[in-house]
Structure formats: structure tokens, C-alpha cells
Image: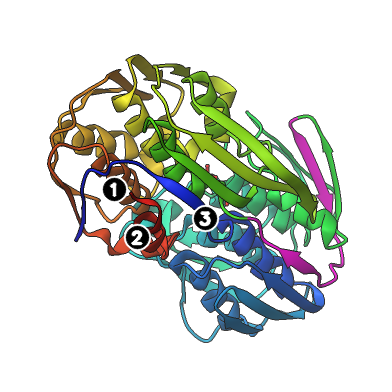
């Protein structure tokens, strides 16, 4: 249980741990490359450790010490049949991206996950991979994990993705590395492009044109990667500082890939003062220091192509909206129903419990602020981002907010509580 109480203000300079999406991809790309891959700034959270565990199950040697990882690549065709079921834990990225890689292997693999992951939709990756020639079965008519995959003999295709999902796009592109001909994904809306960027850095054949991404069979070479700080983790502190008059916070070395910076745009639209300093680039990924000064926020509208640019930040944006003056409407965010929890219901329940004025919409939520946050006990539902969003809410609450089932924070941000204590004044 995590208990968070009201603070006077927030001040300081911090660094958040490595980007989750990029850390996963570093291990996966390293595993199927020739030679060694060194990863610095790796996120040693449970999700990315699940990816390491699964790749070890495929015969890849991986050394991990804190945020440093060395992957001894086995080349594109060097993975071996796992002797046991692969376990992706809570991690959708692990299961969906690995399904793409496993679809390219002629051996049998079975991949499962925890209770939450076993209830999340897998047809969105299994269906297109089947179209390319992989044999994939699973519970509920092949739609839910555990998934049983026997791949090989894939054929390239053009796939119009019906969901704006980087995991779906990435799974298909990864299988395209093993397919005959060209594999093209046409996105509904632009989603995070870490796969495209990293594939290129590892020597893969990839081309991007607007919403269309194509790959063909490629030989990848191991690389040295510097993982930027995760803007999705920084977002909790950004909202806390932006909504607290007098606060001043610097967050160093944060990833600023434009497909991920919707949180900056939205907080600015809400009236926050944000500046970016010390910009630099590594492996095609821009980074910099985010400087935020606190003030009074006002409500905003969030919809359309903005959603994929901040999809993981919506729980904490809902907290910002509860503290802001006026109405905030978030629409076009139905995907929130398929995350680690149903994040529309989870936030409506959690924020409603502590005194905010929030209602669910079929594809989002509406929040009218500012609410007097009274406090109380809420259930994270085992969802790390719900737990951290409500911890941020506790900083503004009359009485403490108690977050039950807070151990899930370790999934993406084990240092969260320590960093929070460091900046509270
Ligand atoms: C991710 C993509 C997003 C995001 C998830 C990480 C990735 O999921 O929510 O946390 O690393 O590709 P969807 O592809 O389901 O939108």
C-alpha cells in the first residue's frame, strides 16, 4: 500500500529511468542481430525483465546489471525452440512484439502472461500474422493468450491496421524481417516509431512514407544503445509540477520523440510553463531536459491523432484535468479499455472515489474541475499507471490517498516513490 499526502510544493532536478518501449526493443533487436548489443539506461522494471526472460528462453545469452545490459546476438535465424512456456508477465509489448518474431520461426513456442495480459486482445496481432502464413492458436478461438505459435514460410503483405497501435505495427514489421518480399503496414494514425528507428540503426531494410512503413528480410548487426528517460514516467512528475503553483522541476535526459510528446503539448494547452533545454540525439531518438514551472491549469479537448501521442499518459492527464479550471474532454481513446486495466473505468472509479467530478464517455472521459480532492482509499487494479496517477493526485488532496496494490508500480517505474520523496517540499 502506498500512502501519499498533500505537499507544500515540488522542487529539484531528477532523472527518470529508461524508456520502456525502447528498452524492450533493444533486447529483442539485440537477440536477433549478429554480434553484441550494449544497452545503457535500460529500464530494469518487471516488464522489460520479462522480455529478457523470454529471450533467454529462446537461447539468447543476456547479461543484465541494473540499467546496463549486454545481449549476445544469435543472428536473424539463430533463436532456438524454447523448452518451456515463455512468460511475458504483465507486458503487452513483450507478448505482441515477440509474437511477430516467433511467427518467423519454424519451431513451436507457447507464450503466456499474467491474468491481466491473458485477458487482453491478441487477435490484433494473431490475425495479420496468420495472413502472412504463421499458425497461431490460443484460447477463445485463438484470440487470447496463451498463444501457441508455429511460424515460418511467411509471405510479405500490405496490412491496413484497423487499430492505432505501435505494438501491432511492430509485430508485423518484425515478422516482415522473416518474410518473402516486402511487408507493409499502413497505420490509421501515426503511433510511436521506435521500431522503425531502431531497425534502421541495426541495419534493417526499412522505409517510411507518411502512415506507411515497409520492411524486407534483413541481416541486423548488434549496436550500442543509449536509452532515453521515459517521457511516460516523466509525465507523472510533469503533471504534479505543472498543477502546483510555485513548483519548479527539471527532468534530465528525457526522450522527446515527437510520436511521444503529446503530454507536453497538452500541458501547454492547459496553460503550463514548460521549456526544453540541452537537446541532443542518440540512435535517431531526440532527448532533452524538461523544465516545468507550476501554475493554474485550465481544461482542454484531447482527441484524434493526439491520442496515440499520449495514450499511456491519459490516467495522469485525467488528474491534471481534475485540478484544472473548467471542462476537459478526452475522446477517441477507446483503446484505453484494452490496457493493463480498463483505464476509462479505472480512472472514473479512482478519481470519483477521492472527490473529482469525472464521467465515462464511450471512447474517453469528461472531467470538470477544479475539484476539492478529499482523499480516500483506491484500488490500482494492479495497473502501474493508475497507481502512479493516483499517487500524484494525493499530493493535492485534503486527506491522504491510499493506493492499494501499489507493488505494480515496479512494472515500469521501480524508483517512483524514492524520486517523489526527493522532490516533495
Ligand atoms: C507500446 C505501445 C502502446 C503503449 C504501450 C507500449 C509499444 O500500446 O500503450 O505501453 O512499446 O509499442 P498499443 O500498441 O497497444 O497502443
Placement of 255 over or under 411, stated as above or below: above
Mark 2: which secondary structure? helix
Separation (CA) of disc 1 from disc 2: 9 Å
Is disc 1's CB within 8 Å of ligand 1? Answer: no
Is 365 magenta? The answer is no
Residue 369 placement: quadrant: top left
Which quarter shows the N terminus? bottom left
Q: Is residue 142 above or below residue 344?
A: below
Give above or below for 74 relative to 320. below
Magenta part of the protein: which range? Answer: 211-228
Considering only order in the chain, which callout, 3 or 2, is on the residue closer to the N terminus? 3
Are the residues tagged 1 and 2 within 8 Å (C-beta)?
yes
> Which of the two residues, 238 or 345, is positioned nearer the viewer here?
238
What residue would you read off at disc 1?
391
Residue 328, given in percent of the width and then of the height, sits at 37, 18
Q: Is residue 104 left or right of residue 19?
A: right
Amino acid at each position: 500500500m502506498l500512502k501519499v499526502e498533500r505537499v507544500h510544493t515540488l522542487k529539484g532536478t531528477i532523472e527518470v529511468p529508461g524508456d520502456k518501449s525502447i528498452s524492450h526493443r533493444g533486447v529483442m533487436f539485440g537477440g536477433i542481430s549478429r554480434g553484441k548489443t550494449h544497452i545503457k539506461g535500460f529500464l530494469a522494471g518487471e516488464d522489460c525483465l520479462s522480455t529478457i526472460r523470454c529471450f533467454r528462453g529462446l537461447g539468447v545469452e543476456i547479461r543484465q546489471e541494473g540499467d546496463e545490459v549486454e545481449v549476445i546476438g544469435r543472428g536473424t535465424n539463430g533463436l532456438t525452440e524454447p523448452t518451456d512456456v515463455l512468460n511475458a508477465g504483465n507486458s503487452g509489448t513483450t507478448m505482441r512484439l515477440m509474437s511477430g518474431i516467433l511467427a518467423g520461426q519454424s519451431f513451436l513456442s507457447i507464450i503466456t502472461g499474467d491474468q491481466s495480459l491473458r485477458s487482453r486482445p491478441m487477435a490484433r496481432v494473431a490475425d495479420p500474422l496468420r495472413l502472412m502464413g504463421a499458425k497461431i492458436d490460443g484460447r477463445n478461438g485463438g484470440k487470447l493468450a496463451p498463444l501457441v505459435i508455429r511460424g515460418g514460410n511467411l509471405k510479405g503483405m500490405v496490412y491496413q491496421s484497423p487499430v492505432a497501435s505501435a505494438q501491432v505495427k511492430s509485430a508485423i514489421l518484425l515478422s516482415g524481417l522473416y518474410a518473402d518480399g516486402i511487408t507493409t503496414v499502413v497505420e490509421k494514425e501515426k503511433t510511436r516509431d521506435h521500431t522503425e528507428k531502431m531497425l534502421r540503426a541495426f541495419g534493417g531494410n526499412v522505409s517510411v512514407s507518411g502512415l506507411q512503413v515497409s520492411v524486407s528480410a534483413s541481416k541486423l548487426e548488434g549496436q550500442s544503445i543509449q536509452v532515453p528517460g521515459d517521457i511516460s514516467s516523466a509525465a507523472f512528475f510533469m503533471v504534479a509540477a505543472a498543477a502546483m503553483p510555485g513548483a519548479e522541476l527539471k527532468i534530465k535526459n528525457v526522450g522527446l520523440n515527437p510520436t511521444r510528446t503529446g503530454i507536453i503539448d497538452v500541458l501547454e494547452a492547459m496553460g503550463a510553463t514548460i521549456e526544453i533545454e540541452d537537446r541532443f540525439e542518440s540512435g535517431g531518438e531526440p532527448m532533452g531536459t524538461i523544465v516545468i514551472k507550476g501554475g493554474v491549469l485550465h481544461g482542454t479537448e484531447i482527441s484524434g491523432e493526439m491520442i496515440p501521442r499520449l495514450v499511456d499518459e491519459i490516467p495522469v492527464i485525467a488528474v491534471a484535468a481534475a485540478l484544472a479550471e473548467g471542462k476537459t474532454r478526452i475522446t477517441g481513446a477507446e483503446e484505453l479499455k484494452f490496457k493493463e486495466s480498463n483505464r476509462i473505468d479505472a480512472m472514473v472509479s479512482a478519481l470519483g472515489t477521492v472527490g473529482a467530478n469525472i464521467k465515462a464517455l464511450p471512447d474517453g472521459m469528461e472531467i470538470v474541475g477544479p475539484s476539492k480532492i478529499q482523499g480516500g482509499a483506491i484500488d490500482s487494479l494492479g495497473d502501474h499507471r493508475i497507481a502512479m496517477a493516483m499517487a500524484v493526485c494525493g499530493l493535492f488532496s485534503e486527506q491522504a490517498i491510499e493506493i492499494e496494490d501499489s507493488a505494480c508500480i515496479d512494472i515500469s517505474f521501480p524508483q517512483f516513490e524514492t524520486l517523489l520523496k526527493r522532490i516533495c517540499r
